[in-house]
Amino acid sequence: MVALYGIAAFVFIVFALVALVVGLLLALTPLVTAWGATAIVAGVLVLLAYCSSRMALKRWRSARAALAGDKGE
């Protein structure tokens, strides 16, 4: 049952993020063209994905080193 609630929460957060992206596209379109709004939103999402992946890789390496017993020497 707990897993079902976790899956439901994940689905709802994905829908919320999609709604946020669509809302941003609709809000930015009058200010910059539709292509400009798409470029801005996609660019920010790519930047966030890059930063998140860099942080995940840094944490992965740190955890791997801690498990291997490296002292960073």
Image (spheres, rainbow, N blue to C red):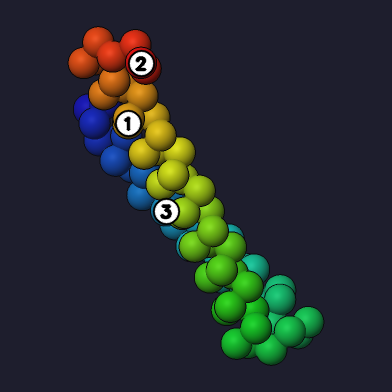
Image quarter of residue 38:
bottom right
Q: Is residue 32 left or right of residue 47?
A: right
Q: Is residue 70 left or right of residue 9?
A: left
Q: Earlier in the sequence, mark 2 or mark 1?
A: 1
Q: Amino acid at mark 3?
A: Val
- In the picture, the disc for residue 39 is none
Question: Element type at marker 3?
Answer: helix
Q: Which residue is mark 2?
A: 73
Judging depth in this view, the residue of 63 and 72 nearest the camera is 72
In the rendered image, the vertical position of residue 51 relative to residue 19, given as above or below: above
Rounded to the nearest angstrom, the CA distance separating label 2 from label 1 is 18 Å
Question: Element type at marker 1?
Answer: helix
Q: Amino acid at mark 2?
A: Glu
Q: Which residue is mark 3?
A: 14
Residue at image location 32% in from the left, 31% down from the top: 60
- In the picture, the disc for residue 60 is 1
Q: Earlier in the sequence, mark 2 or mark 3?
A: 3
Residue at image location 26% in from the left, 24% down from the top: 64
Q: Is residue 12 visible?
A: no
Which quadrant: the C terminus? Answer: top left
Question: Element type at marker 2?
Answer: loop
In the rendered image, the vertical position of residue 38 relative to residue 57, given as above or below: below
In the rendered image, the vertical position of residue 37 relative to residue 62, given as above or below: below
Residue 27: image location, x then y, percent: 71, 74
Rounded to the nearest angstrom, the CA distance separating label 2 from label 3 is 42 Å
| Comparing labels 1 and 3, the label whose residue is closer to the camera | 1
Which quadrant: the N terminus? Answer: top left
